[in-house]
Image (cartoon, rainbow, N blue to C red):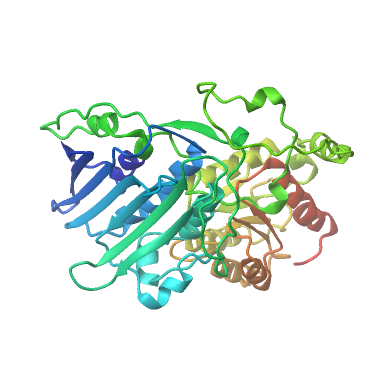
Amino acid sequence: YVINEGLKMGGRPDSATASETENGEIIEVRSRGSDGTVSSKIIEWSVDRSVPQTMFVDEKDLTKLISCLFLNAIKFTDSTEGRVRCSARMSQRGRYISISVSDNGPGIPADFLPRLFHAFAQGDATIGRAHEGLGLGLMVAKGIARKLGGDLNCIRAETEGPDHGSQFEIKVPVMAGETISRPPSPSGSPMPRRAQPAHHTSTHTLHMPPVEPATPHGRLNPVCESAKESLLSSKASPQSPGTTPSPRSQQLLPVPAAAHSITSSPTTTSAPTPAAPEPKRPAPRTRKSISTPEIDRDLATKHPLTFLVAEDNKINRKLLVSMLSKFGYTHVLEAHDGAEAVRQMAVNRRKSSTAEVGAGAGGGVVDVVLMDLWMPLMDGYEATERILGMDGGVGRKPTVLAVTADVTDGALERAAQVGMRGFMTKPYKLMDLQKLILEYCARNHVEGGSN
């Protein structure tokens, strides 16, 4: 799945011809540009025979982790001579699986490497803008690796010479509950965590069918059929590559014993569960806080508002629009980046020069902007400054709320400095959005105050 999705980046290729190797395949992908120029990339994958067929791991997390590195490698390799390699092997002592992703792209400057896994780091602004930026990609990927009990490191980064490009290595423990030894986390990187207990993991079976002969006409299907499932198994979440949930969204709930069963043979080994005494206080408040809140389907009637959703990821953008519709909001504009958000706000204000901000629900002036922080062309910070700086003379300014996966202190402080009022973290939740509307938007609408 991971490789096939990577082949479609920038549009479905004209052809993809796969030729078998001892432990995998070499795939030549050919595409034709709008000017008729033919370009090709070489993708090579292999899984060493020492890799076990079954391991305990969160399948979705592992897929997100590999996808993040593989898709970045595809993005930043040259379209005419690009080459990407992805391989998996066992460590010498058999404690972990090493997955390597390398490319012959532009590489990473040496002075940038210490900040590589920090929030929203970008080595070259031009490269980032051209490919929609790396965003939280590498930081989140490292967080996922450590969540699985492993780690992610850059082991090669050359910007010049015949070996230019980069290489990343993922280490994932074979047994659930183990944690790979590693130095303390650098500033800005997620802290290591032990792998989740067995009831939070799934059995990941690496099916290893015989490799079929390469097809002469370059069909895509054999790529998926002959690939070992360690690289091509389950579909990733529709979200952008892995996001780290905010602490406030992580609530531990009691899990029934029946939910702990694993669909594998009874003899499989799982992480040992320490014998701990039953807690004397079961914290009944936790259950109450989860069962009490209800979604207000008539929120739009009580607090009529018009929204603008600025989010470069189409899936996330449509999700936010859908969530607003559950509250009854139908007047929702959309923008795919910060520059488009500014343009739409300027047009909206000109068309509604006689309307009151807060009249909402009638398709008038935009009352609320849900703003992603990191977007191509213009980020959410700059877009917010421009929107709030517009002198339209139309009552009070709109309320701008951040929707982001970046909950670092620096990001939130900067958001407050440019005028954002509140924030909602990814993955989005209906209750979080409802609280934002009630706390920042509905109150302002009723009071008629200014931002």
Residue 365 visible in this rendered orientation of the protein: no
Quadrant where the C terminus is found in the figure = bottom right
* Residue 238 in picture, x, y percent from top left: 49, 40
Quadrant where the N terminus is found in the figure = top left
* Horizontal relation, residue 324 to residue 262: left or right: right
Compared with 232, 451 (above or below) is below
The residue at the point 45 percent across, 46 percent down is 95
* Horizontal relation, residue 375 to residue 288: left or right: left
The residue at the point 54 percent across, 21 percent down is 266
Observer-nearest of 15 and 163: 163
Observer-nearest of 164 and 241: 164
Kindly give the residue lying farthest to the bottom in the view shown. Answer: 111
Observer-nearest of 412 and 110: 110
* Horizontal relation, residue 368 to residue 158: left or right: right
The residue at the point 23 percent across, 34 percent down is 220
Observer-nearest of 80 and 176: 176
Compared with 361, 59 (above or below) is above
* Residue 212 in picture, x, y percent from top left: 19, 28
